[in-house]
């Protein structure tokens, strides 16, 4: 919709906002997507991307919605992505990501903003750099080759749980080298999986997190992380791993190391993100196996690769294109009612005055499904990223919301993009899979029910051709 008055633009907090030639209009003047008493939550749960597109096509980047009982603003599109990601300091992430603060630590990275977030990220970022992840990649490769062989000797494996457990076990053998039993690690992995499924529940998370079985594994995990941190602080001969490096980084910034803060550091180094990486791996495998002709293309490429030269693997064009398309059409994080942002100060946007504390619903993956940028956007088509000269296209600017953006860009991005495709290729180079479910035609809002408790039995069969 056109602005209700001629507009000029100004910079405020690093963001370009529309400023009206006259007094900006109040929140009540912003168009409403549906009747005041109609909640869009049912449609969000059934077809989130469809809902985002309907709102965007009708009202553009801004309108009012009622979502999960909350009156909020919908702000979506490429310019909104750009503007919100450029102003991370003005959004209350502690409120948006309250479950992390409640369940893990007050200074959890995703619950911080401004200088506190910058400090925490400075401490942790080197541990998730491309260089650091590459350093551990050969060991990861060998660990999972042996693990996959063991899986293949079973009648079937619970595919999701196996990836979760072994991704976590490897992190405990590399990033944090502590003598922790596999049973303890697997319990911590299970806690992470159940914890993540609660963050989308809004106020209902309290009942979910109060379940006795959850409380037990949560408390075990917190004691494990805190115990590792305490032992490392007291150690006289600590291993030269990522945790030791983090402690040194903290000593360079703090006069005294807080054990609660270190507990969260241990969590970030060992367990954080394993669910997203496992989902990414399974999604890649599912598309490659079930999209017509895709498995043949992938195997024609990876069968020419020796399975050992990891730098050569990173240049395989078919796999790279599939990874890009999977990020685009299979977003792992779909905005739900837990995804409101709250501005800590008022601002103007498109001629309207947006007060501080207004709930803002920001579907950052909307741009990945706009047909003006990606033809037939719900179709999996890795060739959309191919260049005629044999190179690869990049995402259209400001459309890629898979890892978030700005100061809160996912710190574990390199882990997912380096580890996931490598493990997919090694598995498909050696095994066929039986029982892997087909991908959904359209993304759903996940993590809102108990389907995650169901097993995913998959059989690995050694290839004969």
Image (spheres, grey):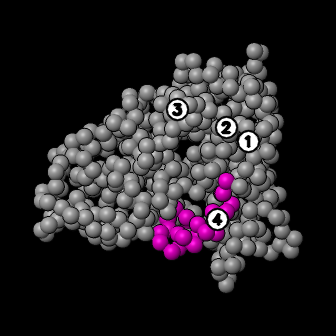
Q: Does the magenta stretch include residue 110?
A: yes
**Residue topped by disc 4:** 124
Residue in the picture at 25% in, 52% down: 62
Q: Distance between the residues labelled 4 and 1?
A: 25 Å
Q: How many residues crowd mark 1 within 10 Å: few (<14), some (14–19), many (20+)?
A: few
Q: Is residue 381 left or right of residue 228?
A: left
Identify the disc placed on residue 387.
3
Return the mark for residue 109.
none
Q: Residue at x 64, y 65 (%)?
A: 124
Circles 2, 1 touching at the beta carbon (< 8 Å): yes
Pick the residue in front: 92 or 403.
Answer: 403
Would you name the residue on which mark 2 appears?
315
* Badge 2 or badge 4: first in the primary sequence: 4
Residue 120 percent across, percent down from the top left:
59, 69
Q: Name the residue under label 1.
A: 311
Q: Residue at x 67, y 84 (%)?
A: 255
Nearest to the eye among marks 4 and 3: give it. 3
């Amino acid at each position: 919709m056109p602005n209700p008055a001629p507009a000029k633009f100004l910079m405020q907090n690093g963001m370009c906002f529309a400023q009206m030639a006259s007094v900006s209009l109040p929140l009540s003047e912003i168009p409403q997507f549906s009747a005041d008493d109609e909640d869009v939550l049912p449609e969000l749960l059934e077809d989130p991307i469809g809902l985002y597109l309907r709102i965007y096509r009708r009202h553009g980047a801004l309108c009012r919605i009622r979502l999960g009982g909350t009156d909020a603003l919908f702000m979506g599109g490429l310019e909104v992505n750009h503007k919100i990601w450029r102003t991370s300091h003005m959004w209350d992430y502690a409120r948006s990501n309250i479950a992390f603060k409640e369940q893990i630590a007050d200074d959890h990275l995703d619950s911080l903003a401004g200088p506190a977030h910058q400090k925490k990220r400075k401490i942790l970022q080197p541990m998730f750099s491309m260089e650091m992840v590459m350093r551990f990649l050969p060991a990861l490769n060998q660990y999972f080759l042996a693990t996959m062989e063991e899986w293949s000797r079973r009648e079937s494996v619970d595919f999701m749980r196996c990836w979760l457990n072994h991704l976590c076990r490897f992190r405990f053998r590399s990033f944090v080298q502590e003598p922790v039993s596999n049973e303890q690690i697997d319990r911590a992995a299970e806690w992470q999986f159940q914890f993540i499924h609660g963050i989308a529940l809004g106020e209902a998370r309290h009942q979910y997190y109060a379940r006795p079985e959850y409380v037990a594994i949560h408390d075990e995990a917190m004691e494990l992380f805190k115990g590792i941190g305490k032992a490392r602080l007291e150690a006289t001969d600590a291993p030269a791993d990522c945790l030791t490096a983090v402690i040194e980084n903290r000593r360079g910034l703090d006069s005294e190391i807080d054990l609660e803060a270190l507990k969260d550091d241990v969590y970030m180094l060992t367990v954080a993100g394993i669910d997203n990486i496992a989902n990414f791996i399974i999604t890649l495998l599912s598309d490659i196996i079930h999209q017509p002709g895709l498995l043949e293309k992938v195997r024609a490429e990876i069968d020419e690769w020796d399975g050992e030269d990891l730098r050569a693997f990173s240049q395989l064009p078919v796999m790279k294109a599939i990874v890009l398309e999977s990020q685009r059409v299979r977003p792992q994080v779909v905005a739900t009612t837990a995804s409101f942002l709250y501005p800590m100060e008022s601002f103007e946007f498109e001629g309207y005055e947006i007060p501080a504390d207004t709930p803002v619903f920001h579907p950052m993956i909307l741009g990945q499904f706009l047909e003006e940028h990606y033809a037939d956007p719900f179709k999996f088509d890795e060739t959309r990223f191919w260049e005629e000269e044999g190179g690869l296209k990049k995402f259209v600017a400001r459309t890629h919301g898979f890892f978030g953006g700005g100061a809160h860009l996912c710190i574990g991005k390199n882990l997912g993009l380096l580890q996931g495709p490598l493990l997919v290729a090694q598995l498909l180079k050696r095994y066929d899979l039986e029982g892997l479910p087909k991908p959904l035609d359209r993304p759903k809002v996940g993590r809102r029910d108990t389907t995650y408790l169901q097993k995913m039995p998959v059989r690995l069969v050694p290839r004969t051709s």
